[in-house]
Amino acid sequence: MVIEPTTEPDPLCWSGTNYRSLHHYIIHLEDGDISELKTALEFWKTGMNGSPASVSKETFPLVHLASRLEKLALNLHKGSGFAVLRGLNTKDFSAEDNMLIYLGISSWVGSHRGAQNKKRDIVTHITDAKEWSNIPHEQRHGIHTNTALPFHNDMGCEILALQYREIAKQGGATSVSSATTICAELAVDHPEVLKELMTADWPVQLTAKPTRYARLPVLAFYEGRVLISVDPGRLGLHPATAGIRDEGCDLNESQIKALEVLGQVAEKHSISIAAQPGDILFVNNLALLHKRDAYLDAETRRHLVRLWLRHPDLSWEIPEEMKAPWKVAYGPIEEAGSFLVPRDRYQIVPEKEYKVPKYSSGSAAWLIDSDEQ
């Protein structure tokens, strides 16, 4: 693949070192917006009052706020690639109502919701719950610890949505970094790294039993856009399957070096999001990398709620060689694989009992779990 130069200004070519305004990406909800959300919530309860899966633009109607959310969606796909919606006080609502409002808002940003694991959980709770204290961090997914997570993508996701229910006492900031900017620097200073990232030879683990890898690129230039899809936790051997070696499942020295340089350049150009409780962060997950700092909790625990969204009209085309994780998240059940069940699940609150994953780690995604749990 060859990256073709262009004279057109690219709104995704930004850097945290010279971003025009650290508050430019924040969209503030006004009193009228909050009233409209409450009205839409009551409309849903009166007309539907069923599964959260039924929340949509049609069942959660917005008028004035809809146009702002549509502009937000446009910015995700044709602008800077991220935005924060601020002003909702989650403490004014029950856990269920918070979920319904979050789903309602998100429906206007991306009406398709992706499955995040083999059980087809549509909602994921990112927290280090007190009830899980008997399970060592080493046995949990990274998002269920308070440790730092490196720059990565949620592989398979198009639009990443994170609602901040509670923030940490110290640390825990989310940072984002543009793949377009990263790619431009790599092309000049590290062309060998850029070539490595774009080579379809990265072993991405898809299933655990039988152990199956797909050799994919983690970065591509496609239809005039830079697309990135990389999670260090899903590349190469997982410790639980280390005894079952497949050809090509190890990262080579060039790939290890490429990940190191990628992380360094991403850090150089990143923006740290100073989130507040109630914020909803939307990220174009094909255009930006994100990471999380380590954190310390207070009596209340840092708690984010994650959705994987897709906008059917604005959605970016994805090259076929990068589609395998995407098909699992958004594709039909028969295409995604028999290990998925057809019923979507919406967990209102984190589960009380933590089920230790046998295989999947990763920074974000769980889709390599096998049926045998």
Image (cartoon, rainbow, N blue to C red):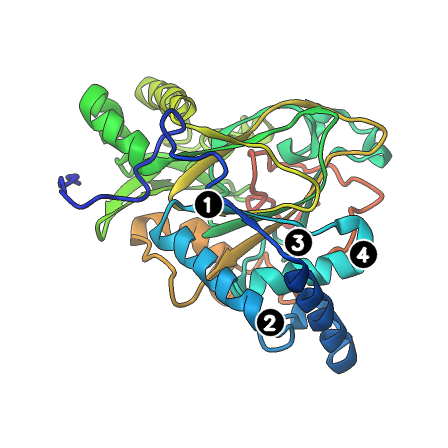
Q: Are marks 2 and 4 in contact (CB under 8 Å)?
A: no
Residue kind at label 2, given as amino acid type: Leu
Mark 3 touches mark 2? (CB < 8 Å): no
Q: Earlier in the sequence, mark 4 or mark 3?
A: 4
Q: Which residue is mark 4?
A: 93
Q: Which residue is mark 3?
A: 123
Quarter of the figure that contains the N terminus: top left
* Front in this rendered view, residue 94 or 319: 94
Q: What residue is rendered at 26% in x and 24% in y?
A: 193
Estimate the x, y position of residue 312 in percent, counting from the top left. Answer: 42, 67
- Depth check: 182 or 346 in front? 182
The residue indicated by pointer 1 is: 82
Q: What residue is pinned by disc 2?
A: 62
Task: List x then y, in percent, for residue 278.
Answer: 69, 46
- The amino acid at mark 1 is Phe
Residue type highlighted by circle 3 = Val
124 and 225: which one is in front? 225
CA distance for labels 1 and 2: 22 Å
In the picture, residue 292 is in which quadrant?
Answer: top right
Q: Is residue 133 left or right of residue 240?
A: right
How packed mark 2 is, by other alpha carbons closer than 10 Å (few <14, some 14-19, many 20 or more), is some
Upstream in the sequence, badge 1 or badge 2? Answer: 2
Kindly identify the residue that appears in the image at 39 percent across and 19 percent down: 264
Q: Position of residue 36 (x, y in %)?
A: 67, 68
Q: Which mark is residue 307?
A: none
The residue sitting at the front extreme is 31
Q: CA distance from mark 4 to mark 1?
A: 26 Å
Q: Quadrant of the C terminus?
A: top right
